[in-house]
Image (spheres, rainbow, N blue to C red):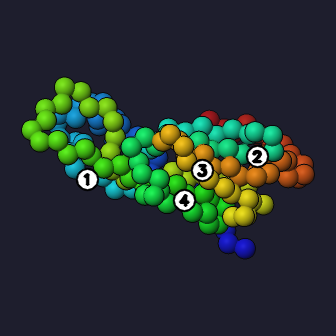
Amino acid sequence: MSQRNPLRGLAGMLSDMERMRNLGMTGPERGYEARERTHADAWSPAGDLFCLGSDLVIRLELPGVPMSDIDLTFSDGVLSVSGGRETESEEEVTYWQRERSYGAFRRLFTLPERVTGDQIAAVARDGVLTVTVQGACTPSGAPEHRIPIGEGSG
């Protein structure tokens, strides 16, 4: 059995936070958003995760992203959704305001250890990707273990 990296995705999240901070401080007119993004500083589509009965449902908003360009994979307990949205090429455009993000993205979702790839199904409709993980919201049967919190010296 392979061991999971508990910090997987942390570097991407920190990079996203730094990008948002820089964009908020300088604005897009300073050229910060002009450089090409990588997976480390990509945009992140909005999504919802919820249980519907015993199934886990993940819905991601992907307007303007061709579903044929979406890569959905499952490995070592992690579901990965990646793809990209291309910038619309318009000659001599001067934006007054630009809020939509373009380029590559990747979202990672750690699923319960008991989940297999056969339990995962995906459909796309009207720019929304819906991934259903059958049975992922069913309790594993393992008892909850309460961790005591000690008082340290300050």
Query: Is the Cβ of the residue at disc 4 closer than 8 Å to that at disc 3?
Result: no
* Amino acid type at image mark 1: Glu
Compared to 75, does 22 lie above or below?
A: above
Observer-nearest of 134 and 147: 134
For the residues labelled 1 and 4, the Cα–Cα distance comes to 23 Å
Residue at the spot of label 1: 36
Residue at the spot of label 3: 123
Judged from the image, the secondary structure of the residue bearing numbered disc 1 is loop
- The image's mark for residue 153 is none
Residue at the spot of label 2: 55
Left or right relative to 19: residue 54: right
* Image quadrant in which you'd find residue 113: bottom right
Tell me if mark 3 has few (under 14), some (14-19) or many (20+) residues whose alpha carbon lies within 10 angstroms of its own: few
Left or right relative to 31: residue 76: right
Residue at the spot of label 4: 72
**What residue is at 76 percent from the left and 46 percent from the top?**
55
Residue 132 visible in image: yes
